[in-house]
Amino acid sequence: MLDANWPDSWRGAFRIEMRAEAIGLAWRGWPVLPGAEPAAITAEGDDLTWRRPVPAQDNWRELTETHPHEVATWFGDDTHSLLVATGTVLDAIEVDDELGKAAARLLRATGHPAPIVAMPNGRWLFLTTVATSIPRELADQASIQWHGANGYIPLPPSPFQHGVVHWRVKPEVWGWQLPEATEVHDVLVRALAGDRTVAPVATLSTAA
């Protein structure tokens, strides 16, 4: 969340950046949503854990085709998180930091890195085209989450308690073309198995 000690000028700049990112994504056809700031929940003892941002409106599924001009109004004076719905334009596979780094190395070795988002809670999101399923090797892992139909993910620069969401690999690297889900899934399976070779994915195709 935004630091209460931030000067007003910083907070204002952050809101402007959030709004600009939301508008830009909306113009590219991504189903942008306004998100609420993470909410604190009490864990065992005196510790606090933090939920990730959730949609600011209960009818968020109805907002996924909103025109960019209206999207701009969502990110005005009130600071929101920036979310994107999954399952129509894009999907995401969420993994832990260790698997994320291993998979990113494999993708980078091919010369075709996928868009990757890193969250301050140590989780990574690999963005792909929409999939109908994921490999059992991934589905059976409790630490791996598939964000598909009726889901959503936070995008930069959404705030968390101890930082903001950021791009590890920006969509511009792909020319805003999302990599095929099956090929990214394959890389994640290989990374999960400890594979460090490049050959099976020497070239990755993309889809609009």
Image: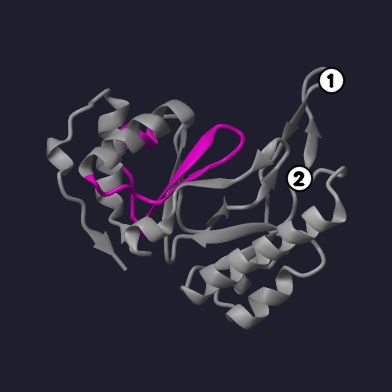
Q: Which residue lies furthest to the top in this view?
A: 45
Which amino acid, mark 2? Met
The colour scheme used here is: one colour
- The picture quadrant where one finds residue 107 is top left
- The picture quadrant where one finds residue 51 is top right
Q: Position of residue 194 (x, y in %)?
A: 27, 23
Residue 80 visible somewhere in the drawing: no
Q: Is 127 one of the magenta-colored residues?
A: yes
Which amino acid, mark 1? Asp
- Which mark is nearer the camera, 2 or 1? 2
Q: Where is residue 158 in the image (x, y as percent from the top left)?
A: 65, 51
Instruction: Label 1, secondary structure: give it.
Output: loop
Left or right side of 187 for 58: right
Residue 69, above or below 19 = below
Which residues are the magenta region?
111-140
Q: Earlier in the sequence, mark 2 or mark 1?
A: 2
Which residue is denoted by mark 2 in the rendering?
A: 1
The quarter in which the C terminus is drawn is bottom left
The residue at the point 26 percent across, 49 percent down is 112
Left or right side of 153 for 171: left
Q: Is 11 one of the magenta-colored residues?
A: no
Residue 108: which numbered mark, if any?
A: none
Instruction: Label 2, secondary structure: give it.
Output: loop
Residue 50 visible somewhere in the drawing: yes
Left or right side of 73 for 92: left
- The picture quadrant where one finds residue 81 is bottom right
Q: Where is residue 23 in the image (x, y as percent from the top left)?
A: 59, 72
Kindly report the distance in space between the C-alpha atoms of the residues bearing marks 2 and 1. Answer: 20 Å
The quarter in which the N terminus is drawn is top right
* Circle 1 residues within 10 Å: few <14, some 14–19, many ≥20: few
Which residue is denoted by mark 1 in the rendering?
A: 46
